[in-house]
Image: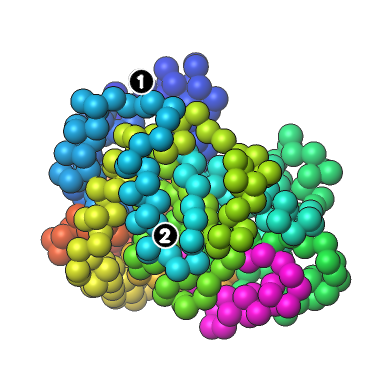
Amino acid sequence: MGKRSKELFVRAGRCIPGGVNSPVRAFHGVGGDPLFIRSGRGSRMTDADGVSYIDYVGSWGPLIHGHAPAAVKTALRAQISLGTSFGASTESEVILAEMICRAFPSIEKVRLVNSGTEATMSAIRLARAFTGRNRIIKFDGCYHGHADSLLVKAGSGVATLGLPDSPGVPQEVSGLTTSLPYNDAEIVQRALEHYRSEVAAVIVEPVAGNMGTVPPAKGFLQKLRKLTREHGTLLIFDEVMTGFRLAYGGAQEMYGVKPDLACLGKIIGGGLPVGAYGGNQAIMSWVAPQGKMYQAGTLSGNPLAVAAGIAALKALKKPGSYSRLEQMSAALEQGLVRAAAMAGVPVQINRVGSMFTVFFTTTRVTDYLSALTSDTARYGRFFHALLERGVYLAPSQFEACFVSLAHSRRDIDATIRAAGEALRVVVSDQP
Ligand SMILES: *Cc1c(COP(=O)(O)O)cnc(C)c1O
């Protein structure tokens, strides 16, 4: 890490807990101190010391067009000159809501919020209001933001830090959340039978990204759909990461399963803070002021954030976006598989579309337990060796990395070359 990043981290540590505004930014998973970033352009970002990296974090998912895409910058400039917040309705929030409803057949009405956390928290409240039930089923290693009821076996940052469930969440609240192994529909069936008519919702990442990338087993989502319907339980797809990422209509389009409620975030804000939750008319009519379930936000539907989101979605809608993402991501995956084989390092590379994770294990990674078999020390060495070679991966084993539309064939080739060297370092450092 450069001198300037080091200085900034020392200063940050004096006034911000752990020196970071979100735990995943600290390099806890890989050791060392985090980089401070000055700017980003296309597939690259530049740190406070002027060193440039090919970036596969993409702000943790939002930046599907890469850094500072022209369309988003233009939209933001235009909106800034008109004003940044009114606390009253604007045409642009209607446009973004219409775009979301058109993209997701499961969403007839949508409420905009400011983050993925707000989206899942509100969807859970709505599911409880609508069903008159309290219990929630989630899956080990799935992260749904940091709301109290969902911070149970929550993958991602808590997995990296090796934390059990967070202090500060009353047992009365976490006790209403049941967390089950991902990809095991039979256990869900047993749980739904056990709790009878107590379960308001099953919430799932339809492709998990927060224990590293883990695809749904064949038929898993379909079985969840069937079981929840039979038990009068709502099925919530948390598509904060996968929405507009795996396909324009998200994982539900890719796997052909229609949830009752869907949560969005990340990409729909074009790099600014936006979240959303939506579903059919009957369920969404419970949301205030149409219904009684209260949920509000001073800056919700913020004109600047919405302008960025609209510009990002419009650009994504252009034909060829998803085939390009698939092509680049497949080339990267194949290159990494070859590089690992040549270096003699056993890895599992999980990839769905432009989400991928390199796990250092011989076990196939299909759920949280198998993700935990990964050698995180090896991942840490791999991460640092790549960083030294100008490639910025997620600084934790238990995260997804993202290919963007700004990554060029040259970026991919350079990454594969760097990974080949990094993988040899991983082995040679072995004690
Ligand atoms: C990122 C993420 C969230 C939380 O979104 P924030 O905007 O960070 O609050 C929720 N669910 C999933 C699946 C996510 O990837």
Report, in whole angstroms, how far the alpha carbon at label 2 lies from the one at label 1.
46 Å
Q: Residues within 10 Å of mark 1 (few under 14, many from 20)?
A: few
Magenta stretch holds residue 397: no
Q: Nearer the viewer, residue 229 or 294?
A: 294
Q: Position of residue 41 (x, y in %)?
A: 18, 42
Q: Which residue is mark 1?
A: 7
| Relative side of 270 to 410, left or right | right
Residue interval drawn in magenta:
213-236
Residue 105 shown left or right of residue 82 in the figure? right
**Amino acid under disc 2:** Cys
In terms of sequence position, does the residue under pointer 2 or pointer 1 come before the other? 1
Q: Are marks 2 and 1 in contact (CB under 8 Å)?
A: no
- Which residue is disc 2 drawn over? 101
- Tell me the element at label 2: helix
Q: Is residue 229 magenta?
A: yes
Question: Looking at the image, is 165 positioned above or below residue 196?
Answer: above
